[in-house]
Amino acid sequence: MKLSKLVGERFKEKPSDCVVESHALMVRGGYMKYVASGIYSSYMPLKRITRKIENILREEMDKIDGQEVQFPVVMPATIWQESGRYEAIGKEMVRFNDRNNSPHVLGMTHEEAAVHLVREYGQTYNNYPFMIYQIQTKFRDEARPKAGLMRVREFTMKDAYSFHTSQQDLEEYYDKCHKAYERIFERVGVPGVISVASDSGMMGGNISHEFMLLSDIGEDSIAICSECDYRANMEAAENINDYVRTSPSEELTLVHTPNKHTIEEVCSFLNSSERNSCKAVVYQRNSDDKYIVLFLRGDLEANETKLTNYLGFDIHPATITEDCGLNAGFIGPVKLEGDFIVLYDNSLKNMNNVVCGANVIDYHYTGLDVSRDLNSVEFHDFAKIQEGGICPKCGKHAIKISRGIEVGNIFQLGTKYTKSMQMTYVDSDGNSQYPIMGCYGIGVGRLAASICEAHHDDYGPIWPKAIAPYQVHLCAVRSDNQEVKELADKLYEELQNKGVEVIYDDRDVSAGIMFSDADLLGVPVRVIVSPRNIKQGVVEIVARDKSFSESAPIDTALNDIMKRL
Ligand code: ATP
Ligand code: MG
């Protein structure tokens, strides 16, 4: 490909709307163009990168007996009504009516389509297990698209669905897929991607893992133990309580705390530590605004995912009105009266000499003994694990919190979709059974952007060889010079004859522009033909990642370039 003909523009200035490097570099490098919020077109360099990623995904899915299929982007509402998700999913799913006024959706995931495809084939147990996958467009009307390809509304996903006749078979396949994912991330150049135990949502009980690239720009928080191999998404990590009483319980005493609303204010006023206080966090049920009051230790934060999983319905932070019966800033577990759902976090279990609200304006209690003063309450895990917290696996105070980008996930689905969509098979004893499913996703664009985050410098991406848009970036510096043009043309042809993917900068532009464009295209090997080099009888071969730089004699240049590939 000649750079003079490459569609797209490259430029120096960092676009003001780009908050992450991968986004800025991909816009500056002529990889993508904004169309609408969360919707982009790709120019050829990006298309070549994603095609290579997709081919690696294909090879690895085929290796674990996957069969590539294709589901439709547009689906009738009926199959989503069967699974119950037509109603359960919110505005993220685009719904519309076709010309006959029949409701349809844009595919945002394809469990329903997968079950629909194999419902008949899967009627006999002999046909199991099997895995089908596709690499295709998804549309999700995300509330806040951001960070370029990291969170978009339209994106390409590799999504795979496996079907099994026993939990053990699913688990064995799940492990195989886990290993395939490790190979994928290694091959595309991000071997540092780790798998973390993740939250399985409202289904509960099921096992799932997310594959995370550790990065400060990541949206997810991950708890990693520095003493053992425990790592989990913060949403899923259990927060352990190791409270031990150090002094005898004092009496429950009402104290005047005028205008002290926050737990910090109250504790500093009473000269007490936040660790020895109990605070209230209030939510409301989405469907009817019923109040949910969660009590937890004052220095901890509530984990909304754990709360919704426990409650089984969606919630939002509460608006506390004057007549709702709650005294904001003074809410406490003793004598709290009203029609609220009241929950207690594990962190409060067994605590004594605790400071808490008294449910009366300007008053708190000191000396709360949770075991003595609260009647038969149940404790559950609703708090976020903290930096320095206790590892749920090895029990040491060794939890570190890191940010991560979720590039993929694997999920033991169980029978949720086969049951709801009535997919059954007859087992060897003649009994009707529901197949057990697993599903496995990787976002192609987010992965490309993550690779860029992991491999770039101030001047541009440094694409790993396996997914780079081209292998060689050939620069003809001073292409108006006859000798330069002849040698560069010749190398271009010879490299192509050898099957090398070459981008050839044949433009009559300054060396500065040529090199900054080459930096933005991030091709692993750069070959420079220039009048000065020719005078010395050489061409320069330089690595984009600066790992080598050599002057190769013109006679052996082709061979020397091939060696560097
Ligand atoms: P997230 O929590 O980031 O929204 P998700 O849990 O919704 O992801 P899945 O539905 O399991 O993700 O999709 C599988 C993969 O698809 C994700 O791991 C991610 O790589 C990619 N993906 C999901 N949503 C987006 C998006 N809005 N933009 C780009 N890629 C996405
Ligand atoms: Mg999502």
Image (cartoon, grey):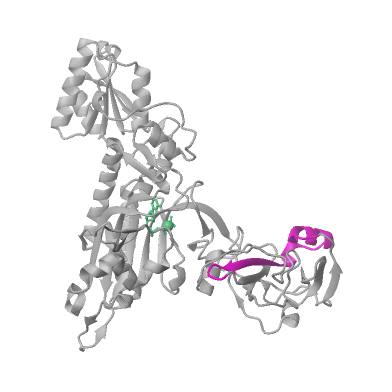
Given the current orientation, which residue lies at the most extreme right position? 256
Residue 35 versus residue 109 in the image, above or below: above
- Front residue of 469/107: it is 107
> Toward which corner of the image does residue 297 lie, by quadrant?
bottom right
In the rendered image, residue 538, in percent from the top left (x then y), is placed at: 25, 17
Magenta residues span 260-288
In the rendered image, residue 249, in percent from the top left (x then y), is placed at: 80, 77
Q: Quadrant of the C terminus?
A: top left
Q: Is residue 409 left or right of residue 397?
A: left
Residue 565 visible:
yes
Q: Residue at x 41, y 50 (%)?
A: 192
Residue 171 visible:
no
Magenta span includes 261: yes
Q: Is residue 311 left or right of residue 5?
A: right
> Toward which corner of the image does residue 64 lie, by quadrant?
bottom left
Q: Residue at x 48, y 47 (%)?
A: 215
Q: Quadrant of the N terminus?
A: top left
In the rendered image, residue 194, in percent from the top left (x then y), is placed at: 42, 56
Q: Residue at x 28, y 78 (%)?
A: 422
